[in-house]
Image (cartoon, rainbow, N blue to C red):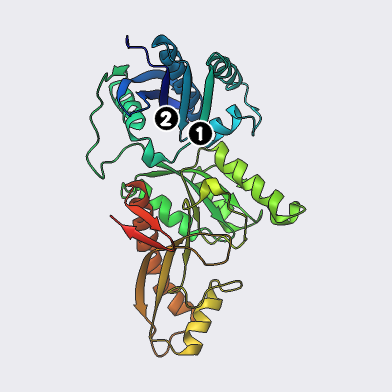
Amino acid sequence: MQEQNNNVIIYTDGGSRGNPGPAAAGFTITDTKGNLLCARGIFIGRATNNEAEYTAIVKGLEAAKECGAKSVTVLSDSELMVRQLNGEYKVKSDLLRPLFLQASDLLDSFKSRKVSHITRDKNKQADKLVNDALDRKKDVEASPKVKNKPSGAASRPIRLGVLISGGGTTMINISEHIKQGKLNAEISIVISSRSETAGVDRAKEAGLTVEVIRKKDYPDIMDFSKKIEEALAGSNVDLVIQAGWLCLWNIPAIYENRVMNIHPALLPSFGGQGMWGHHVHEAAIKTGVKITGCTVHFCTNEYDKGPIIIQRCCPVKEYDTPDTLGARVFEQECIAYPEAINLFAQGRITVEGSRTRIK
């Protein structure tokens, strides 16, 4: 990179297959007009996701200095790293502290600097470099041009944070789809609002990371929500999946349209506070509807509100009980939720006001 560019934009990404496991870092550098100046993938051996994310920003900043940049804007899909570098979160990990200090010193060496979070779908080039380096087990470089991935092509698995309050059947359904190769995702963390529940046991049996965050342990909803947000950020979660989660929490702006919920009815029917599980199916039978189903939607800070992504239908039969109807609806849930997650992973969902459009 011989040309001097005073103002540059650095996209960074890092990934580990195993966490810890084989890891790589990737970055691209563009000028303010979007012209690509440099693009590299660095194979770093065994490391965690967070170590890889920090390595990416360090290598990107070093490359920016090589081209004489005076001002840098760093864009990363690692919310944890962004918040740590902006002083919002403390660095508690001994592994990360040296990398954090190195990145901070490099940032301070620029006349102007900014570190911001972006969603994963806006970081595809850096993500591709990470995967190329991992696949080849060596450094890769693509300057001055990086080929774009075909539309809808798979990249690294998206990191899911799964929120549960009960038995975890939806969580297990998602986990099975991942194991069968039907879902390009990994469950980075499971958060339970209850300590003694079958869902916690099932998650541990599946080898998943589990954290119990009970609402009653916090003085108010904001402290409760902050703890959830920190746990999600600490696991570099791309998408939050509410899977039988019964607690209202304050969804921060950074997770807007990144939290999904599945409801066992065709919203807006039979939704709202207290409408969950058998309560929903009892109401459907009592009102005499002939068709019900399930709804996957993005969440807001109101019960069962937010843009609808997918709905699937099933009949309500004459002699249904809440249990028989619930089983039929759950069959549709097992199809709808993985489908919605795949659409998100492929970057095919756009939100326009209160509606979604599928590309």
N-terminal of the two: label 1 or label 2? 2
Measured Cα–Cα span from mark 1 to mark 2: 18 Å
- Image quadrant in which you'd find residue 120: top left
* Residue drawn at (54%, 30%) of the image: 81
* Residue drawn at (54%, 32%) of the image: 82
Above/below status of 314 relative to 155 = below
Q: Residues within 10 Å of mark 2 (few under 14, many from 20)?
A: many
Residue 204 visible within the image: no
Q: Is residue 182 left or right of residue 147?
A: right
Quadrant (top left/top right/bottom left/bottom right) for the N terminus: top left
Residue with the most extreme right position? 219
- Residue 90 image label: none
Residue 205 pos. (x, y %): 52, 47
Residue 21 pos. (x, y %): 44, 26
Quadrant (top left/top right/bottom left/bottom right) for the C terminus: bottom left
Residue 144 pos. (x, y %): 26, 20
* Residue drawn at (65%, 50%) of the image: 225
- Residue 116 image label: 1
Circle 2 sits on which residue?
Answer: 15
Marks 1,2: beta carbons within 8 A = no
Above/below status of 298 relative to 59 = below
> In the structure shown, which secondary structural element does the residue marked by tag 2 occupy?
strand
The amino acid type of the residue labelled 1 equals Ser
The amino acid type of the residue labelled 2 equals Gly
Above/below status of 308 relative to 317 = above
Q: Is residue 357 left or right of residue 161?
A: left
Nearest the eye: 253 or 194? 253
Above/below status of 110 relative to 153 = above
